[in-house]
Amino acid sequence: MGFEKFGRKSFTAMTKTAKFVDFLAEGKINGTVCKKCGTKYFPPRADCANCFSNEMDWFEMPKKGRLETFTTAMYAPFGFEADPPYTMGVVDFGNGLKLFARLAKDIKPEDVKVGMDVTVRTLKYDDGQLSFEIAKA
Amino acid sequence: MAKDVAVIGVGQSHFVRGYEGSIRELAFEAFREAMQDAGITQKQVDASIFCSAPEYDKQRSPAGVLAEYLGLIPQPTFYVETVCSSSSTGVKIGYGLIKSGLHDVIVVLGFQKMSEITSAESQERMGRGADIQWEAPFGTMMPAYYALYAQAYMAKNGLTHDDLMNVRVKAATYGQINERAVYRKGVKPEDFDPKNPEAKLAAPVALPLRVGDCCANADGSSCIILASKKKVKELGIKKPVYILGLGAASEAVNMAARPDCAQGIKVAKVAADVAYKMAGAGPQDIDVAEVHDCFTIAEIMAYEALGFAPVGEGKQLIREKATYREGKIPVNVDGGLLSKGHPIGATGGSQIRTIVLQLRGEAGPMQVKDPEIGLVHNIGGVGLYGNVTIFGR
Ligand SMILES: [Zn+2]
């Protein structure tokens, strides 16, 4: 499976981290961790900028975090016209790891608050695209 | 502070929607004004640097094409890009080339014809403005990124929608008196009232940002001519404005790899610290500033990054009208990106031109009273690149 399966619409076909999408299919949101120095990365990276190693393992991201910020897009770029309004945000897991994603459609806009507890989960769109989203804790 | 490199000429085209000409003709407008301002000919120019955001250009490798049109061949030319701060980066590189002794006079030309591509093409490019691998697949766009900063910042610091609106009201105050601005209309609070059916600026774009919180796309060009101290003397330049400090910084493209959005744009603070140190100056020494107000929230965050206000207190400056022309630290008294317009590659050079004219006492109706030191804050992408440049007479 290639990286074109990632997200609502992917702009990248090939990356050494394409296995990320296979993990999404298994219900896992994974980052990479350097085998040599232990540095953790999300989004995943194939190369460690800390020690120059290219030997990476996968690790599963934490589930629970707090919503650092969010925005609701009323307009969308080309290729996403059918989607607005949709809310995107940043989750801080508190251990140096963060994640950017859309918020699940089942969260009411008026319930979204900076600092609220949230969880993250994988998601499959009707067209088969694989992604992950921020959900109610 | 060293006064080794000076700005000897400045130029800018009108910033417009749908420029009726090609990029070479657009570039020529700013170039002609800057060359006539400096009072030099092409023979006296040693090299040229062209700056734009390439995703809007149909012409591949524009530097050579534009250098020929401006009459700057066979001198060396090249192209630099840091999106919205491209021409500030061009000036920084020009400074280095002069300071090293390699060249004495350099033309830095920023241009952008955003209308070169269709609005559908533009929408697609804007959507890919940041991390195309890990963020664009969620449907991101520029206003949404700044909205992420705005949401976190407003929650933490008690900044209100009205504070943001008042940044726009200030910008429009000066856009009305800047004949080069794309948005010449005034803005009143009623224009932001969601209950007013006529209020076009109230429509949400990416909450909490509304149409009125976003700058205007524009076509435009800017030109800054730099010269060594030696050449300033030889050419008999009457009102040289010297570069006193230069700071630049870069940041992670992905929001997941950045500090808390509530802290503002990190590159601005890093670049400001470097520029202040080099200039041997501090925020209290700045008499007039141009900041990168691509969105209203960006101006408030800039006040703090530059040290004009304590962290979290940027709102006070707009509430007290301290950044109006008569205030203690006038900011964007040419209309800023919000009203003057934001032709990506030309923006930094236009900001520099405003500060140079201010320091020379030639800013016309926008003139601040007798400024000696001015500052330009120019951000590329969503805080991907930060540039702060300090100028003095
Ligand atoms: Zn490592």
Image (cartoon, rainbow, N blue to C red):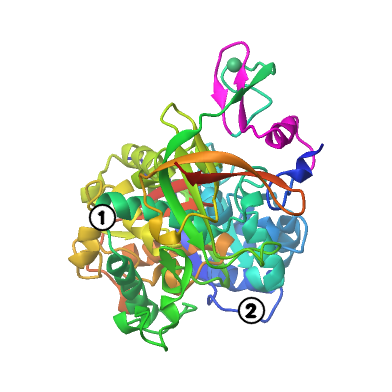
Residue to which mark 2 is pinned: B19
Q: Nearer the viewer, residue B68 or B50?
A: B50
Q: In the figure, B333 relative to B387: above or below?
A: below
In the image, what residue type sits under mark 2?
Answer: Tyr
Of residues B7 and A71, which is closer to you in this image? A71
Protein chain holding label 2 = B
Describe the element under mark 1 as helix, strand or loop: helix
User: Element type at marker 2?
Assistant: loop
Residue B238: where, in percent of width, then height? Answer: 38, 63
Q: Mark 1 touching mark 2, by CB under 8 A?
A: no
| B376 magenta-colored | no
Subunit bearing disc 1: B
B122 lies left or right of B258: right
Q: Is residue A34 magenta?
A: yes
Q: Residue at x 61, y 47 (%)?
A: B135
Mark toward the start of the polypeptide (1 vs 2): 2
- Identify the residue under disc 1: B314
Return the residue found at the far top. A36
Residue occupying the point 49% across, 49% down: A89
Asked whether residue B238 is in view, the answer is no
The percent coordinates of residue B339 (x first, y second) are 43, 74
